[in-house]
Image (cartoon, rainbow, N blue to C red):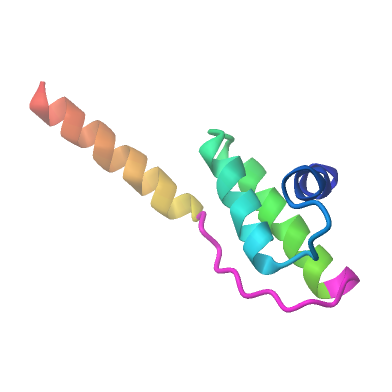
Amino acid sequence: MHYYLRYCHDHHPNEELTDDIAKEYILHRYALGLDWQTVNSDYSSIQKFYKNIILMPWNIKKYLDREREETTHYIIQRRCSQNH
């Protein structure tokens, strides 16, 4: 949560927290190339913060799915090996 709140302070000063900002941050963390587990943890923490602490609605669908990511890596590896 510390990193998220710092991100909000640095990139959206004087703005109220919104789920659009949370979505932007989650995508930012994913774009950094962090492990899916890290970004998933970020997502869960921010979701709990919004829903249970500041009592704001949470309308963000989860972007990361471990099975899909692993399947994607398998498909990519398989296609690369077939082409060589």
Q: Position of residue 25 (x, y in %)?
A: 65, 50
Instruction: State the predominant SS element of the stretch in magenta.
Output: loop
- Point out the residue furthest to the left here: 83
**Residue 65 shown left or right of residue 14 in the figure:** left
Q: Position of residue 39 (x, y in %)?
A: 63, 46
- Point out the residue furthest to the front here: 14
Q: Quadrant of residue 46?
A: bottom right
Q: Residue at x 70, y 50 (%)?
A: 41
Q: Position of residue 7 (x, y in %)?
A: 75, 44
Q: Quadrant of residue 58?
A: bottom right
In what quadrant of the picture does the C terminus appear?
top left
Q: Residue at x 35, y 47 (%)?
A: 71
Q: Residue at x 67, y 56 (%)?
A: 43
Q: Position of residue 55 (x, y in %)?
A: 85, 77
Q: Residue at x 40, y 53 (%)?
A: 68
Which is nearer the eye, 23 or 70? 23
Is-magenta flag for residue 59? yes
Which is nearer the eye, 70 or 5? 5
Residues rendered magenta in the picture: 52-64
**Residue 15 shown left or right of residue 33 in the figure:** right
